[in-house]
Image: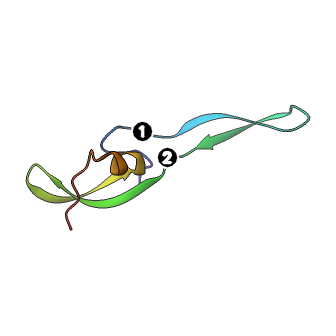
Amino acid sequence: MARVCDVCNKGLLSGSKVSHSNRKGKRVWAPNIKRVRAIVDGSHKTINVCTRCLRSGKVERAL
């Protein structure tokens, strides 16, 4: 499953993990993606949606 939201296109963010001694290493932040049955263009479809889009009501769920 791709770690990208189908609604807002939110994906992976990269950066550095920084230790107490200020040593740096690479790390990745992944969005909280859920696989959801939603109503898209009047039909039921399974899409990957971040929880922020679910919470804000940008997706109409098909229950």
Q: Amino acid at mark 2?
A: Pro
In the image, is residue 46 above or below residue 10?
below
- Picture coordinates of residue 38, whole percent (x, y): 22, 57
Q: Is residue 30 left or right of residue 20?
A: left
Report the residue at 54% width, 46% height from top.
30
State the residue lying farthest toward the front: 56
Q: Regarding mark 2 in the picture, which secondary structure is present there? A: loop
Q: State the image quarter where residue 13 is shown.
A: top right
Q: Circle 2 is placed at which residue position? A: 31
Per the rendering, the mark at residue 20 is none
Quarter of the picture containing the C terminus is: bottom left
Residue at image mark 1: 10
Residue 42 % position (x, y) = 8, 53
Q: Quadrant of the N terminus?
A: bottom left
Which residue is at the front of the view, 7 or 25?
7
- Please name the amino acid that badge 1 sits on: Lys
Residue 19 lies left or right of residue 3; in this view the side is right
**Residue 6: x %, y % from top left:** 31, 45
Pointers 2 and 1 in contact (C-beta within 8 Å): yes
Q: Assess disc 1: are there few (<14), some (14-19) or many (≥20) residues with their C-alpha within 10 Å of its C-alpha.
A: some
Mark 2 closeness class: few <14, some 14–19, many ≥20 residues within 10 Å: some
Is residue 47 shown left or right of residue 45?
right
| Mark 1 secondary-structure assignment | loop
The answer for how far apart the CA atoms under marks 2 and 1 are is 7 Å
Measuring 87% from the left and 31% from the top, which residue is drawn there? 22
**Along the polypeptide, which appears first: circle 2 or circle 1?**
1
- In percent of width and height, residue 52 lies at 41, 46
* Residue 45, above or below 53: below
Q: Is residue 26 above or below residue 48?
A: above
Q: Nearer the viewer, residue 1 or 51?
A: 51
Horizontal side, residue 50 vs residue 26: left or right:
left
Q: How is the image coloured?
A: rainbow
